[in-house]
Image (spheres, rainbow, N blue to C red):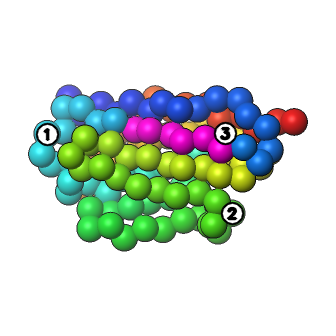
Amino acid sequence: QVQLVESGGGSVQPGDSLRLSCTASGIGRMFEFYAMAWYRQPKEKQRELVASITYNGRIRYTDSVKGRFTISRDNTNKAAYLQMDSLKVEDSAVYYCNAATNVNNTYWGQGTQVTVAS
């Protein structure tokens, strides 16, 4: 049973930083073949892709976080991270970790709340 556990969310002020972590279990050595991604879902809005990193390190960001967020992965520790700098109020959302090899083999974490408010 593959499980993803996010951590690192919290309540911060605009301009602050947070680092989200996602740790995978039950995935064994296959972790390195999974694309990892971070999604977010603001209150009463649809879930959106924030950043992704493929098994071979190709990275993509949604336009609104480019230059502020950094996604990374650690295959040895079966983890993925999202460094979020210069946070804005509009970054407030529940952030979800996703691991996938294809559309039929995808896993989600339970989510971690990020609240940015002055």
Q: Residue at x 26, y 68 (%)?
A: 56
81 relative to 64, above or below: above
Q: Main secondary structure of the magenta part?
A: strand
- Is residue 39 something one can see in this rendering? no
Left or right of residue 61: residue 57: left
Q: CA distance from mark 1 to mark 2?
A: 34 Å
Which segment is the magenta one? 17-22
Instruction: Provide residue 107's location: percent of width, then percent of height.
Output: 33, 41
Task: Name the residue beneath numbered marker 2.
Answer: 64
Q: Is residue 13 left or right of residue 23?
A: right
Residue 44, image x, y percentages? 73, 38
Which residue has dot 1 on it? 28
Q: x%, y% of residue 3?
A: 30, 31
For the C terminus, give its image quadrant. top right
The answer to whether the residue labelled 1 contacts the one labelled 2, judged by CB atoms less than 8 Å apart, is no
Residue holding disc 3: 93
Say which amino acid is labelled 2.
Answer: Ser
In screen coordinates, is 16 left or right of 83?
Answer: right
Q: Name the residue nearer the viewer: 86 or 37.
A: 86
* Mark positioned earlier in the residue sequence (1 or 3): 1
Residue 64 on image: x %, y %:
68, 63
- Which residue is found at the position 29% from the left and 36% from the top? 24
**Crowd rating for badge 2 (residues with CA inside 10 Å; few <14, some 14–19, many 20+):** few
Point out the image quarter for the N terminus: top left
Q: Residue at x 48, y 30 (%)?
A: 7
Residue at 63% x, 66% y: name it. Answer: 67
What element does badge 3 sit on? strand
Marks 1 and 3: CB-CB under 8 Å?
no
Hey, what amino acid is under mark 3? Ala
